[in-house]
């Protein structure tokens, strides 16, 4: 069984500023830091750290080669990443002010240039029962889902960041949804529903899919046809919750692939996400499987 993460690869440019630049203003920044990013990249790294053999598919420009190095270093296979030499990699211009608040400008770049030809080539290498992990930061998701469904792949959708494009996808092809409360509420078009009801309603709408609802510091819920599970969040001093959901997704699926049961997969995902919350940054905050196991031993 193989796992393919078809998703975004991003360069995050973080500029330190005294205040956010205003209309018509030219402002000198005091520092620039460059980070690897993208939900697809984060989830591939989390899957690999959980012990899965993962292939990443996506696209970068000539400026994004260091993203491939980071993925390879984490033992993610990058054979299916296309390099579009005349284009720019997807990027985010992030202003960070003295209070630590952000404002973010996104450019989709090569993340929005996934071609049908690339999708055909990539999916041809996978078979029935292989996992496909998707988020909402690349184009052509419908076509990827159609091809993967026709192949009999197990489709995992993390509908993040949520927008109306998600509602236009063939969501009935999804085998596992991994999503937070806001995303679930938007798919169901309902608000102020309690956690369990939200998961149940989603399961009613997609009876063939498993639902994994993440609830931040309140833990997570798993529902499928025959199982109802809950997992509380582990107590940590949360300093930066960036990539909590990506870490959870990678460790949940990675753990299933390593043969763990659903409850154990929830526990490992929750522990890995808690550790990520206790560290700064996105991809660098994702723990290794050993770190997760040591953390779990300390909890008993
Ligand atoms: P997202 O980052 O996609 O919004 P959540 O905020 O629901 O997702 O977080 C995903 C998972 O990360 C949660 O189910 C939980 O296991 C873990 N998590 C999130 N916030 C915390 C926290 N403050 N303390 C411990 N674990 C957390």
Image (tube, rainbow, N blue to C red):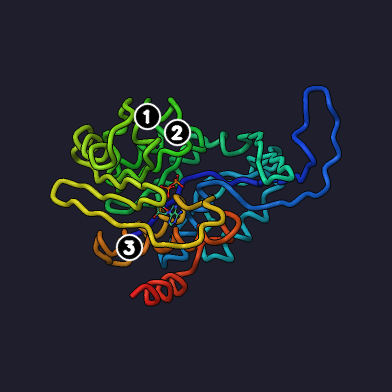
On screen, residue 25 versus residue 245, left or right, reads right
Q: Is residue 8 left or right of residue 35?
A: left
Disc marking residue 186: 1
- Total labels drawn: 3
Residue 23, image x and y in percent? 78, 23
In the image, residue 228 sits, relative to residue 179, either above or below, namely: below
Dots 1 and 2: beta carbons under 8 Å?
A: yes
Residue at the spot x=29%, y=57% of the render?
A: 231
- Residue at the left extreme of this rendering: 226
Q: Nearer the viewer, residue 69 or 28?
A: 28
**Mark positioned earlier in the residue sequence (1 or 3):** 1
- Relative side of 297 to 11, left or right: left
Q: Which mark is residue 267?
A: 3
Q: Establish if 244 lies above or below 103.
A: below
Cα distance, mark 3 to mark 2? 25 Å
Q: Residue at x 56, y 56 (%)?
A: 239
Q: Which mark is residue 151?
A: none
Nearest the viewer among 188 and 117 is 188
């Amino acid at each position: 069984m193989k796992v393919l993460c078809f998703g975004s690869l991003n360069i995050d440019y973080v500029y330190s500023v005294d205040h956010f630049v205003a209309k018509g203003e030219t402002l000198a920044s005091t520092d620039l830091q460059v980070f690897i990013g993208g939900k697809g990249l984060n989830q591939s790294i989390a899957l690999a750290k959980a012990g899965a053999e993962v292939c990443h598919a996506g696209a970068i420009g000539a400026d994004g080669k260091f993203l491939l190095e980071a993925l390879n270093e984490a033992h993610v296979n990058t054979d299916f990443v296309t390099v579009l030499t005349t284009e720019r990699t997807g990027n985010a211009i992030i202003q960070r002010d003295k209070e630590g608040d952000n404002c973010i400008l996104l450019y989709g770049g090569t993340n929005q240039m996934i071609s049908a030809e690339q999708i055909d080539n990539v999916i041809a290498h996978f078979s029935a029962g292989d996992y496909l992990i998707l988020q909402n930061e690349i184009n052509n998701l419908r076509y990827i889902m159609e091809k993967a469904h026709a192949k009999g792949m197990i489709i995992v959708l993390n509908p993040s960041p949520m927008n109306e494009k998600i509602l236009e996808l063939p969501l009935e092809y999804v085998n596992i949804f991994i999503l937070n409360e806001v995303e679930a509420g938007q798919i169901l078009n309902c608000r102020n529903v309690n956690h369990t009801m939200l998961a149940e309603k989603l399961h009613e709408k997609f009876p063939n899919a498993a639902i994994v609802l993440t609830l931040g510091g309140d833990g997570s819920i798993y529902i499928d046809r025959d199982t109802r599970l809950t997992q509380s969040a582990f107590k940590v001093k949360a300093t930066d919750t960036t990539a909590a959901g990506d870490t959870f997704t990678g460790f949940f699926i990675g753990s299933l692939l390593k043969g763990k049961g659903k409850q154990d997969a929830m526990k490992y995902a929750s522990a890995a996400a808690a550790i990520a919350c206790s560290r700064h940054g996105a991809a660098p905050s994702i723990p290794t499987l050993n770190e997760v196991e040591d953390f779990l031993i300390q909890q008993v």
